[in-house]
Amino acid sequence: MSTGNEKIAIIGAGLGGAAAGALLQHAGFNVQIFEQAPSFSRLGAGIHMGPNVLKIFQRIGMDQKLIDISSTPAYWFSRDGLRGDYLSRIPLEGYGATYCTVHRGDLSALQMDTMTPGTVQFNKRLTRLEDNGSDVYLEFQDGTSARATIVIGADGINSRVRETLLGAEKPHYSGWVGHRAMISAEKLKKFDLTFEDCVKWWGPDRHMMVYYTTSRRDEYYYVTGVPHPAWEFDGAFVQSSREEMSEAFAGYHPVIQALIEATDDVTKWPLFNRNPLPLWSQGRMVLLGDACHPMKPHMAQGAAMAIEDAAMLARCLEETGSQDYATAFRLYEASRRDRATQVQTVSNANTFLQTQEDPSWVYGYDVYAEPILDKSVA
Ligand code: FAD
């Protein structure tokens, strides 16, 4: 794989960057990750990790560790948010690996453990990078710099690497926000109601997705999608409130009212988007995950696509070696573009699993069983 002197720099140690780091390191590459955050803390948010991702985590010995700390729902229920009727009961078993819902912080901590200590350098905000033909020069906000043979931009929706490839362009505000709250299951005991493992409550123009985030089922989490005409705040999120939630979900089902009553802390996140990019790589720089194809989160597959990207990119680099990165990047984009775009489109439409449908195309997908495609890309 590596001939010794090559170095792969990954920008961002989010779920996609960390997956790329671990997979490339397991394949024998010399990898360094540069992350802008000073450290990662256990912020209040959950995440779904479907069987398509667990198949990848098997490769780095992380699948069972994740299952051990996650809730593993047997069904995704879709219910009418006002009346409570079941719109669909989608089995989450039978796709070749387990379906997990978990705390994002716990997932991230497991991912960090899959890499050699020291792989991730924190407090390294990339400010500038330049491909000079023979390597890439990286400059960070703290005044330090580095050089790498190739650079993987896993730096999220406001990617500096994407900006270098394609120019500055703000993502589009989708007109929607997501509220996020983590609730102590203890607080739900007083209600004579059933809190299902994984359920999406659908209203005419809004929804609330709810699930447990631990194997102990002591944390219950909700994330909404609610129309909100303009995002008038600075920063990634703002504080919301129980009152705002009550107003947004007035008249909704008693389970939703109970969740709002049990809410201690709730935040509000703008949902941003981009159109499919005209290119995924240029020279020695390549993109993955939200840097490349951000989407509204309504399919719970954004991070999954970042991790699938990481797996396919690692496969392509293993196939070609890092010196022939140009071929690897071409194969990677050819093998990933259609799937990522399809998921991006369905996720943005917010229809996935609302009615009884077969989700095998998403969960049954095994990135290692897919052919590496060699079609030329526009
Ligand atoms: P990110 O997770 O954004 O990571 C980027 C990293 O790069 C960050 O750590 C950041 O600090 C770092 N970085 C950025 N700029 C720089 C820089 N200049 N220098 C150095 N470091 C930098 N997806 C799912 O699969 N399942 C779900 O259930 C789910 N729920 C969601 C709910 C909500 C409300 C939202 C908003 C998203 C949800 N997603 C979900 C989508 C998912 O969060 C993203 O798709 C995923 O995090 C993308 O991963 P990434 O690694 O590409 O980018």
Image: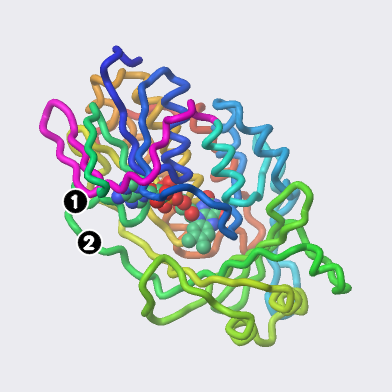
User: Which of the pair 20/376 is nearer the observer?
Assistant: 20
Within 8 Å: ligand 1 and the Cβ of disc 2?
no
Location of residue 73 with respect to 187 vertically, above or below = above
Decide which of 272, 368 is in the foreground and name it.
Answer: 272
User: Residue 169: which disc?
Assistant: 2
Is residue 368 shown to the viewer in this render? yes
Residue 292 lies, with reference to residue 149, above or below; the image says: below
Answer whether residue 16 is magenta in the image: no
SS at mark 2 in the image = loop
* Residue 253 in the image, given as x and y percentages of width and height: 73, 79
Q: Quadrant of residue 114?
A: top right
Q: Residue furthest left?
A: 132
Question: Which residue is label 1 attached to?
Answer: 166
Q: Residue at x 54, y 71 (%)?
A: 267
The three-letter code of the residue at mark 2 reads Glu
Whether pointer 2 and pointer 1 mark residues with C-beta atoms closer than 8 Å, the reply is yes
* Residue 28 numbered mark, or none: none
Residue appearing at x 64%, y 62% in the figure: 355
Q: Position of residue 363 (x, y in %)?
A: 59, 43
Q: Which range is magenta?
A: 114-140
Label 2 neighbourhood size at 10 Å, few (<14), some (14-19), many (20+)? few
Residue found at the very far front of the displayed protein? 143
Q: Residue at x 50, y 48 (%)?
A: 40
Residue 283: image quadrant is top left
> Which quadrant does the N terminus fall into?
top left
Callout 1, which amino acid?
Leu
Residue 226: image location, x then y, percent: 52, 76
Say left or right for 244 vs 9: right
Residue name at image x 69 percent, y 56 percent: 76
- Compared with 176, 142 (above or below) is above
